[in-house]
Amino acid sequence: MNTLKNKVILIGRLGKDPEIRQLNDQTKLARFSLATSEKYLDRSGHAQKDTQWHHVVAWNGIATLVENYVHKGQEIAVEGRLRYRQYQGRDGIKKTATEIVVHELMMLRSPKTAYLPLSQVQEPDSEDLKRYLEELEFEDSLLSEEDE
């Protein structure tokens, strides 16, 4: 039950390309904003859309994945934990930031195909699929090294 104490799962779209920082030889940081939207009918029956923006942070292996494959407009799913952080702004005032620290990330659809019906999304050819699977194995090896 401990794993359920601070868990966040979001599905949304990136508002802009991720910001990537190499902090030292072994630490990489990716930051991006993720929009989640909800559609509903108000009391008068008019369709409304409520969009929330979330600050997302990914480290090391997941940051490398974000750097190479995640771009503005892309729909992704993230699972992680909620973190509150305090810092001093440039104006000298103490501020609080709320962010999601990613533990898992799944790419759902690319920006090029994001607005197409699934029936119109072209499947990759066998060579593209082979290259993609090889890249995933490489990413898995990076993630497993991170866990050690």
Image (spheres, rainbow, N blue to C red):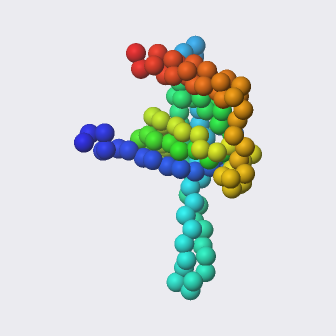
Return the residue found at the far right. 112
Return the residue found at the far left. 1
Task: Name the quarter where the N terminus is drawn.
Answer: top left
Question: Residue 147's image quarter?
Answer: top left
Which sits in the foreground, 70 or 25? 70
The image position of residue 137, as x and y in percent, is 55, 21
The image position of residue 102, as x and y in percent, is 48, 37
Query: In the image, what residue occupies the spot 69% across and 28% down?
Result: 126
Taking 65 as reference, is 83 above or below it?
below
Query: In the image, what residue occupies the spot 53% across and 44% down?
Result: 77
Taking 52 as reference, is 137 above or below it?
above
Return the residue found at the far front. 126
Question: Residue 64's image quarter?
Answer: top right
Query: In the image, what residue occupies the spot 72% across and 32% down?
Result: 125
Asked whether, in this view, residue 102 is left or right of residue 148, the answer is right
Q: How many marks?
A: 0
Task: Name the quarter where the C terminus is drawn.
Answer: top left
Return the residue found at the far top. 25
The image position of residue 50, as x and y in percent, is 57, 65
Taking 37 as reference, is 29 above or below it?
above
Residue 123 appearing in the image: yes
Query: In the image, what residue occupies the spot 59% across and 36% down?
Result: 31
Residue 95 appearing in the image: no
Asked whether, in this view, residue 139 is left or right of residue 128, the answer is left
Taking 110 as reference, is 125 above or below it?
above
The image position of residue 103, as x and y in percent, is 45, 34
